[in-house]
Image: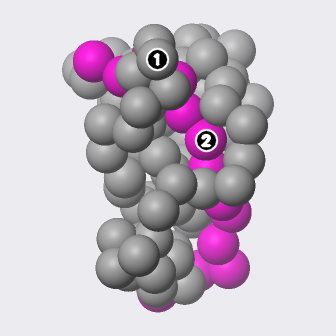
Amino acid sequence: MSLAKPWRDLDRTTVGSAPNRYGLYELGDDEGETVGFGTGVLRDELKEALAYGDATRVRWEVADSEAHAERLLAEHVEE
């Protein structure tokens, strides 16, 4: 199940504005179709996605901890 957040362009500005906190992120393509989910420190993960991935859009949800981010991922993957 997708995050209930608007898509943002996956670019340097968006990566720079991402919180330096754990969270769940969703990567998408130009049409807004989900291409993957992940967890981790958002700014670090999005830097990597921008440099090495093929996604063009992103949305995220901040978590309180690494464990919380993993629970959010499990909830979205199950649905």
Foreground pick, 58 / 44: 58
**Which of disc 1 and disc 2 is earlier in sequence?**
1
Residue 27, x across and y down, in percent:
43, 37
Mark identifier at residue 61: none
User: Would residue 20 be visible to someone looking at this image?
Assistant: no
Residue visible at 45% across and 71% down? 76
Residue that label 2 marks: 59
Residue 67, x across and y down, in percent:
47, 86
| Label 1: how many Cα within 10 Å (few below 14, some 14–19, many 20+) | few
- Tell me if residue 30 is in the magenta stretch: no
- The residue range painted magenta reads 54-67
- Tell me if residue 64 is in the magenta stretch: yes
Which quadrant of the figure has residue 61?
bottom right
Q: In this view, does 8 lie to the left or right of 23?
A: right
Looking at the rendered structure, the secondary structure element under dot 1 is loop
Check disc 1 and give the amino acid type: Glu
- Rounded to the nearest angstrom, the CA distance separating label 2 from label 1 is 14 Å
Residue that label 1 marks: 31
Foreground pick, 79 / 55: 79
Foreground pick, 72 / 67: 72
